[in-house]
Structures are given as C-alpha cells and as structure tokens.
Amino acid sequence: MTSRPIRTCRSRATMCLLEKCVLLACVRGSHVRGAHRELCSPAAADPKSTLKKRRSPPPVFASLSLSHRILEMFLTRTEYYRGVNTFSPEGRLFQVEYAIEAIKLGSTAIGLRTNEGVVLAVEKRVTSPLLEPSSVEKIMEIDEHIGCAMSGLIADARTLVEYARNHRFSYGEPMTVESTTQALCDLALRFGEGDEESMSQPFGVSLLIAGHDENGPSLYYTDPSGTFWQCSAKAIGSGSEGADSSLQEQYNKDLTLQEAETIALSISKQVMEEKVTPNNLDIARVAPTYHLYTPTEVEAVIARL
C-alpha cells in the first residue's frame, strides 16, 4: 500500500518571518527616535534627567501595535492571491483559478466514449532527443477496468492515481468509475493552511477518467476545483478549445471503437505542433479492460489517416 506524500505548508513560516522582520524594524526605529528625542530635548543638559530617561524602558508595546497594523495592511492587499482558503470580495479563490489556468499549458488530451468502450489519446512532449519516450507517461492504469489521461503537473497526477489504486490494494475489490472519480475529487479538495494532513495548494492537473463497469463505458472529466462531469467526448490541455470544437462537429453516439480512434488521432494531429509519431502520442482504450497501445499499434492507427 502506497502512502501519498505530504506537502509542507510554507505560508505560516513565511508570515512568521515577515512579522519578525516588521517587529524588529519597528523596535529599532523606536530606539533611534527615542535617542534622538533625548539628545535634542532641553533636559539633555541635566545629567540626572538624562540618566533617568535612559533607564526608562523603550516603547516596545507601541512598536508591537505598529507592526500588527503594518502586517494587517500587507495581508489585506495580498491574502486573496496567496491564501488557498480565503475568498476574495468577489467570491473567488485565486489559487484554484491559477491551478485551472495551469492546465491550459499542459499537453492536449482527448477522450471519446462509444458503445463499445472509451478511447484516450494524449500528446507526449519529448523535449530532448536524449529523453526516452517510453518514460513519459501521460496515460495511466488505475485498475484493470479504469484508465486516465492527464494534462498539467505529472507529479500531482501520480499522487491522485496512487490514491485511486489504494482501494483495490486495501479491499481487494473494484470500484465503479463514478466512485473512483468522486474519491479523487474529494482528495483534490483537501488543501489548506496550517494543517499537516492537508495539501498546501490545489492539484495542478486535470484528468480524463475512462472506465467500463456494470453501467457500461463512461468518461469523466475532473479539474483542480474538485468538480467532475460525465462526458461523451472531451479535450483538455493547451489545444482543448480547438479540439472541443472539432469533437462537437465529428462526434456521434453511434461511433465504433475504430472510428473513435481515428477521430482522436486526427484531432490530435490538428492541434499538435509536431508531426504525429508513435513517440509523441499515447493511445489507450478501455473496452472493457484497460489496454495501452504499443508503438506498433499506434503506427497502425496513424496509417489509417
């Protein structure tokens, strides 16, 4: 059984350090101002009066209140942008919105549901000729009847996938596709500040979850806000807008599995910046079990275009 990593929350430590710096600056400023007043006052000529003044405690309490006021002014301006649990006056969680925007920079992933099963196709960005293409995983198996394609931060996706796999390891029984999706979205909402069991920020990844259970084939889409939808066809990632438009034109519920493969590949070819090859594209199907295509099988699908 795998354990999910716990992210350290650095916001509390940052705020403590900021408060100490502001307090130190204020205390030092109070000492300088106090010394200046002592030297410039008429009583400075009297040694006894000066000695009495120097023995009096510095105005630390005034500095404390001033530091809190400065800190409050700083927080009021930026807490909506940095905090993961603080709503802005407009009712927005900016950290969740930033995570959703990060998905638009990821690889394009496409999913289509048919009566026979579900097809997934994902672009693989091989950034260097020294990089082994097989090491770039954009489609992962959750169970023998469930697979998922991802766009965004792969490390976050691995955390979600490992969490979903734990049910089979713990109970020895399969989960339905909807229950698996619900469990992942519940985990995606466990972010906060000051709690060691919570994530320090939202997951920066979006998933297309394909599965086949007693209810038949199904396709679900999740985002960093913990929301999920059931879809007939969906695209995520950097080319999602153009891919979704093409899916609306080409998709119909009577598609065969082979036709869905061809549509997914042709749309991927339209939105990808490079030529489609088995090295930069992953294809998988769940019909009714999960199967990731080999490079030879991907080459055969490309040949049908």
Image (spheres, grey):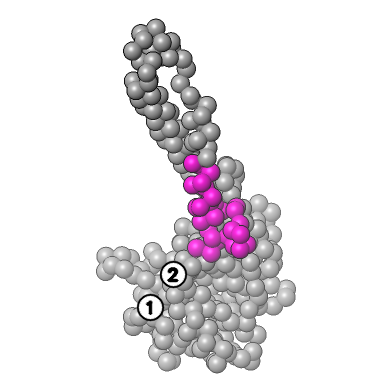
Q: Which mark is residue 106?
A: 2
* Amino acid marked by disc 2: Gly
Helix, strand or loop at disc 1?
Answer: loop
Q: Is residue 207 visible?
A: yes
The dominant secondary structure in magenta is helix
Q: Residue at x 60, y 72 (%)?
A: 221
Q: Quadrant of residue 125?
A: bottom left
Disc 2 residue crowd, few under 14, some 14–19, many 20+, Cα 10 Å: many
Give the number of the mark in front: 2 or 1. Answer: 2
Q: Is residue 83 magenta?
A: yes
Q: Residue at x 67, y 63 (%)?
A: 182
- For label 1, the crowd category at 10 Å Cα-Cα, with few meaning under 14, some 14 to 19 and many 20 or more, is many
Marks 2 and 1, Cα distance to the nearest angstrom?
19 Å
What residue occupies the far front of the structure in this picture?
42
Question: Which badge, 2 or 1, comes first in the chain's sequence?
Answer: 2
Is 133 covered by the magenta stretch? no
Closer to the camera in the image, 303 or 106: 106
Q: In this view of the protein, can residue 35 be seen by the observer?
A: no
Q: Which mark is residue 278?
A: 1
Q: Is residue 205 left or right of residue 231?
A: left
Identified by mark 1, the residue type is: Pro
Span highlighted in magenta in the image: 70-98
Closer to the camera, 30 or 272?
30
Q: Position of residue 26 (x, y in %)?
A: 43, 32
